Amino acid sequence: MINNNVFIKTRKKLIINIMLVVEIFMILMSFFIYNYFKVGIYNTIDRALLDEFHFVNNQFSGQSIMDPIVLQDPKDIVYIYEGNKVIYYTQNRYFSGSVPLNTINRDYGNFFEGYNGYNFRTTIVKNDHYEFRIMRNIDSEKESLSHMLVLLICADFFSLLLVYIIAKYLSKKALKPIEMSWNNQVKFVQDASHELRTPVAIIQSKLESLLKTPESTIEEEAETVAVAMRETRQLKKMISELLSLTKEESIVSVNNSLFSIEDLFKEIFESYHEIAEYQNKTFDYNINMKNYNIYTDRNKLTNLIRILIDNAFKYTEDGDLITIKSCEKGRDRIQITVSDTGIGISEKDQKHIFERFFRSSSVRATEIEGSGIGLSIAAIITNTLGGHIKVRSTLGEGTNFIIDIARGKEVKKRKSSKKKM
């Protein structure tokens, strides 16, 4: 129905955009997580080194070389300088036989440094004329951060694959109603063009036949003019129904009001009983409800019932019966049934009667006028009113169209207020 390349390109762009947005979010999140843990780990080490300084400083004296200092954390390394001379240090496995001199030219505080392939976090604090250098090996922390970085990169990669699968599914699901709507629109234009082509072609041929015999009188060409006028009426009716269909599809707002279903049926009965008498048919209505009130859009409900009644008159013959009935279905809903004893609808055709321009092959072979749009409009109106419509029919015996709609909340409010009074 449509060039698939348009949807394929749109779907690809949608997938790429979803993946790009999610991947940027994942990268930013990974960057935040990595730096959050990195800063947290090193801040914890810095606090521990500062606590170690206070612990060591409380023990340090000029005789500490003879009276070893006990460390709060055995992982820490302590060097105490007086000028450039080391006056005390703790034994460790990183500086065997050699002690770093105090040759560091940097501000006091916390920093990173490396010796013999090892990485350290160092804190230097000056106290009187002594300098305390507290060190801790951070190779294990760096390795943990490296593992975390690899894990985050792998997580980003696998999340990208997962996002691709999800984006592919979501883009297909998101574009499906658009594609269906587009295909329906294309089909609608094709069907409308096909249905309009026939009456236009007939009118054109009749007018051409009149031009070929300009000497003929109106009486002689009365049949030709009548056929052209009949097709013109059919064309006018079809255009009117197309406009109604477009209007119902585009405008879904309803103007609800409280009214009596009996008043509505009486109004419709007065419009059709003379037509029924003229066609030698019986038209009647029946209400089987305790509470006649209903809260919905009166104009739309009237149009809906009129479409079904028009359909019933069209497919019934002399002596047939057409009835509109209403009954309560539970406390909150009502059923309106338009029934007739006409030609009926085959089981195969019942599946398609609400499709646009559908007319069964048996009906098309007759002289019954119709466009196949009326029931489509009826289905749309029913959906707008928040209800549903179904058909029950037996070929040669008759048809029942059943409308199920909500009674309306306003009816409940009125009933409850009456009880309080």
Image (cartoon, grey):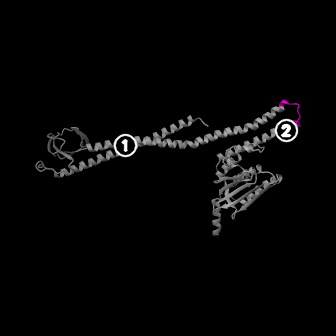
Quadrant of the drawing holding the N terminus? top right
Q: Are marks 1 and 2 in contact (CB under 8 Å)?
A: no
Q: For mark 2, does the 10 Å Cα neighbourhood hold few (<14), some (14 to 19), or many (20 or more) residues?
A: few
- Which label belongs to residue 305? none
Identify the residue at image location x=18%, y=52%. 58
353 or 356: nearer the eye? Answer: 353
Does the rendering let one see residue 30?
yes
Q: Foreground: 168 or 407?
A: 168
Instruction: Spot the residue most to the top.
Output: 212
**Quadrant in the picture for residue 220:** top right
Task: Judge whether residue 267 is colored magenta.
Answer: no
Q: Which residues are magenta?
A: 211-226
Amino acid beneath label 1: Leu
- Quadrant of the drawing holding the C terminus: bottom right
- Camera-near label (1 vs 2) is 2
Which residue is tagged 1? 152
Quote the CA–CA distance across marks 1 and 2. 85 Å
Residue 331 placed where, x, y %? 63, 62
Question: What residue does disc 2 label?
Answer: 223
Looking at the image, residue 216 lies above or below residue 155: above
Residue at coordinates 71% horizontally, 47% vertically from top-left?
Answer: 374
Q: Is residue 148 left or right of residue 128?
A: right
Residue 289 picture location, percent across and down: 70, 63
Could you tell me the amino acid type at mark 2? Glu
